[in-house]
Amino acid sequence: MNETDKIVFEILKKEVAQTFLKENTALSPAISQWKGEDIIKFQEDLLLKVKGRVSEKWFYNYFRNDIQKLPRIDMLNLLSEYVGAKDWATFRAKQLQQEHKKQNTKKYSEKLMRYGVWLLVALFIIGVLSFVINQNSAHHVSFCFTDESGNRIEDVVNVQLQLDNETEKTVHISQDSCFHILIANPELTIKIKSPYYKDKLITRKLNQTDYQETIMLETDLNALILRHYSNSDTSNWQKRRKRLNALIADDAILYQQWFGVDRGVELYSKSDFVYQMTIPTSILKHIEILDVSYNTVGKIKQLRFRVNK
């Protein structure tokens, strides 16, 4: 008996047990563990379904022991018919075909896995090379800001970057008055906005990987005057009121913004705002302008601020 036939016969034994257990019960699902009543019930089921019979001795010889040779062909045919095959030859051919298919699938899976590993390695290498290339071709950009006198700007400046069709990215500039960014595309648009400096829009097409530029911002004198008035004491309140009335439009929207636990806003009329800014016990001390805009004649039409306690 060759090894192939022995393997196929073991498969046949398992299918015989599975066929029997579909309509019967046994102490164990393994046919090699059957004895006594289990064997009797199997003999009866075999006789009922294929009109054949095996002796208890035959059962022990071929189903309970490790066989050295196959049973007679008529017994193999009988058991094959019991599990649904035409005969032993048909059952054997089917099992060999399935085993061959299984081996091919395994080889294909192993081959696919090898290709997958190599593909991952290739993608990793491509990723590393792309990163290195992008790093080498990227533009290291630095923008710094000064006022008209060339002094470094220490107030907060909000810079909105527009790269290609990407969403605008806001960068807050303070302390060193500069911002630094690494970009791949040589074209960018920068919108500069600050409460104390006039808005500015610039576009740049970079022709070098390391680009540095200092941008001069024009001071918003009216915003600085408001800050100065809220941070200094004066006895000449009439002069200060006159100046504030000239700076602010009659229909201006003026509101204080609260942050933290008391988050909210408080609206002021022009007269209330001017009054609070020009009395010694003013509650509008040390205001920080968050946003300011002007009408067509240069007067403040909207002011958003907060008070730094």
Image (spheres, helix red, strand yellow):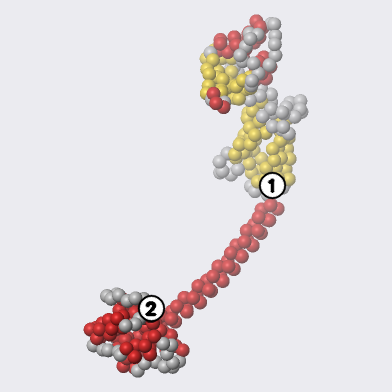
Looking at the picture, does residue 99 appear above or below residue 189?
Answer: below
Q: For this rendering, which residue is in front, 97 or 181?
A: 97
Q: Residue at x 67, y 33 (%)?
A: 173
Nearer the observer, disc 1 or disc 2? 2
Q: Which mark is residue 139?
A: 1
> Which one is nearer the viewer's eye here, 69 or 236?
69
Whole-number angstrom distance, CA of label 1 to CA of label 2: 72 Å
Using residue 35 as the reference point, say whether residue 264 is left or right of it: right
- Of label 1 and label 2, which has the lower sequence position? 2
Q: Quadrant of the C terminus?
A: top right
Q: Residue at (69%, 6%) from the top-left corner? A: 236
Of the residues shown, which amino acid type is indicated by label 2?
Ala
Query: For this view, does 307 lie left or right of residue 154?
Result: left
Q: Nearer the viewer, residue 8 or 290?
A: 8
What is the count of numbered marks? 2
- Residue 40, image x, y percentages: 28, 83
Dot 1 alpha-carbon crowd within 10 angstroms: few under 14, some 14 to 19, many 20 or more: many
* x then y, percent, for residue 177: 72, 33
| Residue identified by numbered label 2 | 30
Tell me the quadrant of the picture where the N terminus can be found: bottom left
Q: Is residue 21 above or below residue 157?
A: below
At horizontal 44% and vertical 82% (from top left) the residue drawn is 100
User: Under tag 1, what secondary structure?
Assistant: strand
Count neighbours of disc 2 (C-alpha within 10 A) and say few if under 14, some if 14 to 19, many if 20 or more: some
Image x and y of residue 171, in percent: 63, 36
Q: Nearer the viewer, residue 63 or 218?
A: 63
Residue 263 seen in render: yes
Q: Position of residue 274 (x, y in %)?
A: 60, 11
What's the amino acid at mark 1? His
Point out which mark residue 126 bears: none
